[in-house]
Image (spheres, rainbow, N blue to C red):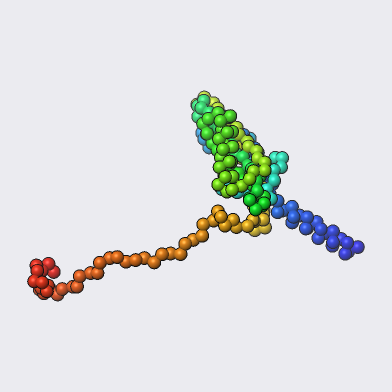
Amino acid sequence: MLFMNRMALLGIMAGAEGSSKSSRGWLMTAVSPWGENAEDAFDQGLVELGLGDARLIQVQGAMLPLGFNIVPPEPLPMGSLVECHLATAFAWNGSTACAGVGYAMCQTPEGDECAIVASITTEADYEETVLLLRRNIQRRLASRDLEVLSFDVAVDEVTAGQDHHGVAIAALILPDSLRMAGRGRTGPIRGGLTRSAEPEKKRVDTKAPAAPALRPGARRGNDGPDFSL
């Protein structure tokens, strides 16, 4: 009986370890058109986004954790430390702005699956911003020689109230990525996209040799003018 309980516990631990190597995330957008200032509008947008009680780390870079998968939005506990890819567009006094974030599930020419993210902020309308965001995703795929398997985008548009600040926020929220630190999967080094450091070239000194020093009062061998001090 003890042996069976131990085996069951090991199975549960192994399953938890396996699931911890996948990274969940979801896309969300929110707008706030009635901020007293830009910071107030942004804070209202975070509350609408479901991140008002979370501590945020804004992530840079296009690559998402290996094993990334999309899940439905979930409520986050108060005080959670969460990584996000954020796009924030501000507007003022009746002007309009758009923000968008999108991801693509893709694979390398060698068959390794991965995922990338792209974001954008514009003063264009919703439809044009969607097209520009898709274009950004295409550029990221092309620069990394990746083939798209599936993708999705989230874009929102805000029109600021009269004499008020507005904000549109789009986010890809990654609630598990920080807990994966040190245990997350990594892929191979892609040599074709990595430039190796070149050895430092030896400097060639082409400076002319200095003229011989003369003692005060001495004259040069050619009996020319003496400019020594």
Q: Position of residue 95 (x, y in %)?
A: 51, 27
Q: Can residue 152 be seen in this view?
A: yes
Where's the N terminus, which quadrant? bottom right
Look at 10% across and 72% down and name the residue there.
Answer: 222
Q: Picture quarter containing residue 182?
A: bottom right
Quadrant in which the C terminus is drawn:
bottom left
Q: In this view, does 96 lie to the left or right of 211?
A: right
Q: Where is residue 206 in the image (x, y as percent from the top left)?
A: 29, 65
* Along the line of sight, the residue nearer the viewer: 70 or 50: 70
Query: Which residue is the extreme one toward the front?
Result: 109
Point out residue 202 in the picture as x, y percentages from the top left corner.
39, 66
The structure residue drawn at horizontal position 54% and vertical position 26%, both measured from the top left corner, is 161
Of 198 and 120, the residue lying toward us: 198
Residue 63, x across and y down, in percent: 60, 49
Residue 44 visible, this orientation: no
Residue extending farthest right: 1
Give the camera-side residue of 129 and 146. 146
Tell me where residue 2 sits by quadrant. bottom right
Count of numbered labels shown in the rendering: 0
Q: Residue drawn at (81%, 60%), measured in percent from left and top? A: 10
Residue drawn 34% across and 66% down? 204
